[in-house]
Image (cartoon, rainbow, N blue to C red):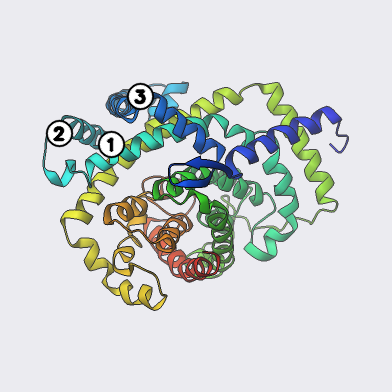
């Protein structure tokens, strides 16, 4: 493995550098408001929206949501009747609960598009905000991010950094070295990918119940793609590096603390077959071994030639799996937030806390703290709906919504439905614990960096 050729090394280095440039390197641009910075992948997304127009993309998204609801019903029935799973069945087949959510999303899209129904669902602050503003933006960013994401995932970058982090994972996070790769998959890919990897490792006897629960609930952070969309949605893309640094520090502290307190600390340290967990030996020459593993992974990726297919599958998963959920839950939550006092009631205890932390527009910001449990995008949606203008407050809302990690529209639902022993109550407790741990850190970093 250590006999790395120049060709293999370049297979690793060039795509990885390109991926880092596209997803993590802000570049200066000229805007109507003056000089600003933007990630290359965001620039491509904005160009597509200008090229097609938001109106055309809105029509496309509406049709997409309708097709998703219909095909999901058919694909789920086909999956039950057949032992094989085709490419399209794997994308559309889901559980009855998520089929209902997709149907609701399609119905709401039709109502908003035709401008028929109660203001609670179709007003500018609810359904129209989702269908004609947020979803076209997500449609565009998902296309480019999904197609280009293999540059970060499939050419050895995870393996290289995973090897570097092996010897620190156990003392810090009570996890084996291989968990570093799962963690990287979540950080640079998608939280559900990390959860699925953890579930597979648990079922294969590589993780104990406690290890699987820790890595799935403490490291399955929302993807860079979603993070970019949140920052863009709130108009603070120029704060990407401050956001990423704060997210890393807050996530690191939470990952150190949460495995040592309930509910994660009470999970059994046994494998799926009941045997006790075993620690792995430390490795020497981690840089050399990591570079060798990364080069080998890059060579395998080029040989398999499935990166374009993987990219399209990611795009379709996001379009057909995420957009309907955002439309359904986002519209209803925005309606509740704008037409009922529910979130005002829930937010009352948090207002003095945020005011004590010197957070501007604390009353409005407090209403975004807990709604992220339903869907990670909702705090950003509500922040825009409430008209929050403070850059510090928007920064805190964006960073907290990502660091809370558990949101039931995707990662939370996948986690609870997996073989990993985490219940719905566990998910609620983990969400609250992470909020309590990360909020003060994020506020402090916001005051220091902005």
Does any portion of residue 189 appear in the rendered image?
no
- Residue located beneath label 1 in the image: 131
Can residue 40 be seen in the rendering of this structure? Answer: yes
Pointer 3: residues within 10 angstroms few (<14), some, or many (20+)?
many
| Residue located 23% across and 65% down the image | 344
Q: In the image, residue 189 lies at what x, y percent?
A: 56, 41
Q: Give residue 331's mark.
A: none
User: Regarding mark 1 in the picture, which secondary structure is present there?
Assistant: helix
Comes first in the chain, label 3 or label 2: 3
Residue 115: give its label: 2
Picture coordinates of residue 429, whole percent (x, y): 40, 64
Sequence order check, earlier mark of 1 and 2: 2
Which of 206/134 is in front?
134
- The Cα–Cα distance between marks 1 and 2, rounded to whole angstroms, is 11 Å
Mark 1 touches mark 2? (CB < 8 Å): no
Q: Is residue 227 left or right of residue 137?
A: right
The image quadrant that residue 400 belongs to is: bottom left
Does 368 sit above or below residue 77?
below
Label 1 vs 3, first from the N-terminus: 3
- Where is mark 3, residue-wise? 75
Which is more toward the observer, 38 or 308?
A: 38
* 3 vs 2, front mark: 2
Q: Nearer the viewer, residue 81 or 108?
A: 108
Query: Does 306 appear above or below 357?
Result: above
């Amino acid at each position: 493995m250590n006999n790395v050729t120049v060709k293999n090394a370049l297979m690793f280095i060039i795509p990885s550098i390109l991926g880092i440039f596209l997803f993590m390197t802000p570049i200066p641009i000229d805007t109507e408001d003056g000089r600003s910075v933007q990630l290359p992948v965001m620039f491509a997304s904005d160009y597509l929206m200008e090229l097609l127009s938001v109106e055309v993309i809105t029509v496309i998204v509406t049709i997409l949501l309708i097709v998703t609801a219909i095909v999901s019903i058919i694909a789920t029935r086909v999956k039950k009747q057949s032992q094989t799973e085709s490419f399209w069945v794997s994308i559309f087949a889901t559980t009855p609960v998520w089929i209902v959510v997709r149907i609701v999303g399609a119905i709401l899209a039709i109502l908003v598009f035709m401008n028929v129904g109660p203001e609670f669902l179709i007003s500018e602050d609810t359904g129209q905000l989702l269908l004609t503003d947020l979803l076209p933006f997500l449609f565009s960013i998902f296309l480019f991010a999904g197609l280009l994401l293999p540059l970060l995932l499939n050419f050895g970058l995870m393996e290289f950094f995973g090897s570097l982090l092996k010897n620190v994972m156990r003392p810090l996070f009570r996890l084996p070295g291989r968990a570093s790769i799962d963690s990287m998959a979540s950080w640079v890919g998608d939280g559900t990918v990390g959860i699925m990897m953890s579930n597979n490792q648990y079922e294969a006897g590589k993780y104990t119940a406690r290890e699987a629960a820790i890595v799935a609930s403490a490291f399955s952070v929302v993807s860079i793609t979603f993070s970019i969309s949140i920052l863009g949605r709130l108009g603070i893309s120029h704060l990407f590096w401050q956001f990423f640094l704060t997210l890393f520090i807050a996530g690191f502290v939470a990952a150190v603390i949460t495995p040592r307190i309930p509910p994660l600390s009470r999970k059994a340290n046994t494998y799926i077959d009941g045997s006790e967990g075993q620690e792995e030996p430390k490795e020497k020459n981690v840089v050399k071994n990591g570079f060798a593993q990364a080069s080998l992974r890059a060579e395998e990726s080029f040989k398999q030639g499935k990166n374009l297919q993987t990219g399209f599958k990611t795009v379709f998963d996001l379009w057909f799996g995420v957009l309907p959920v955002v439309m359904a839950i986002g519209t209803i939550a925005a309606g509740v937030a704008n037409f009922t006092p529910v979130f005002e009631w829930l937010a009352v205890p948090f207002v003095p806390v945020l005011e004590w932390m010197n957070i501007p527009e604390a009353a409005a910001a407090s209403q975004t703290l807990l709604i992220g449990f339903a869907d990670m995008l909702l705090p950003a949606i509500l922040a825009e709906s409430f008209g929050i203008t403070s850059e510090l407050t928007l920064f805190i809302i964006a960073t907290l919504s990502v660091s809370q990690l558990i949101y039931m529209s995707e990662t939370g639902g996948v986690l609870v439905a997996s073989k990993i022993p985490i219940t719905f109550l566990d998910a609620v407790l983990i969400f609250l614990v992470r909020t309590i741990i990360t909020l003060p850190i994020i506020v402090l970093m916001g005051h220091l960096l902005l």
